[in-house]
Image: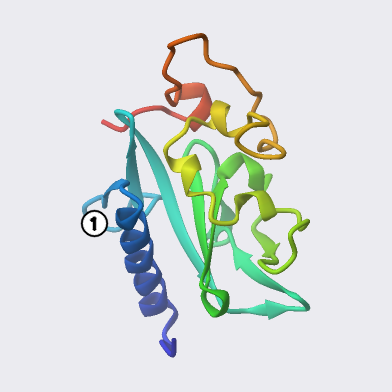
Amino acid sequence: MSIRHAKARGEWAELRFMERATELGLRVTKPWGDNAPYDFAVDSRGHFLRVQVKCTRQKRWNSYRCHLDSNGHPYSPAQIDFIAAYIIPEDAWYILPIRATNHQPEILLNPTRANSRHAQFKEAWHLLVLSADAAACPEHSRKGPPGVECRQPQSGERTQPTAQAVGQGPIG
């Protein structure tokens, strides 16, 4: 990938996100214009999860540095629900709940180390289908995102994203 201009590279990463999400059967919509704090809304069982796509090719030691801010301000759970971070040289995606980023303006991602800090979110596309409560459950991941408690569904109950689990709930 040799797109030099950062904005064009970001748009290309958004296309890659739409392609991968669609391949996985997710329904993705893009807000009109460019003034929303998120790039996409993913329909998850009747609720929309707000996703901001970021990409990086900036290597720092054995990891890749990924900026998680907008004009110097870290994203908050009031603005978005997930960061979809694409590591261009590794062709790897991280689907990070915004609460797992601890309001940091940048993080380091190491797709080759299984025990790295954010390893549980590598290719974690299922988080865009399950609620944040279900994603914290031990049967879905080794360790849930910080600040999210596991709530086991009752017999026959469908787990759906809730306003508490995904920020502000449905868009609309």
Residue ID for mark 1 = 33
User: Total number of numbered labels?
Assistant: 1
Residue 122 in picture, x, y percent from top left? 59, 56
Identify the amino acid type marked 1: Gly
Q: Position of residue 17 (x, y in %)?
A: 38, 61
Image side of residue 118 versus residue 80, left or right: right
Q: Residue 142 sits in which quadrant? A: top right
Please state which of residues 172 and 24 is positioned toward the viewer in this rendering. Answer: 24
Q: Quadrant of the N terminus?
A: bottom left
Whether residue 28 sits left or right of residue 165 in the image: it is left
5, 73: nearer the viewer: 5
Query: Measuring 43% from the left and 11% from the top, which residue is drawn there?
Result: 156
Q: Name above or below for residue 59 compared with residue 81.
A: below
Residue 132, placed above or below residue 96: above
Q: Quadrant of the C terminus?
A: top left
**Residue 53 percent location from the top left of the image:** 44, 59
Crowding at dot 1, Cα within 10 Å, few <14 / some 14-19 / many 20+, comes out as: few
Q: Residue at x 39, y 76 (%)?
A: 7
| Residue 103 in view here | no
Query: In the figure, residue 90 lies in which quadrant?
Result: bottom right
Residue 144 shows up from this direction:
yes
Element class at badge 1: loop
Q: Residue at x 78, y 78 (%)?
A: 61
Residue 76 placed where, x, y %?
Answer: 55, 42
- Say if 156 sits above or below 143 in the image: above
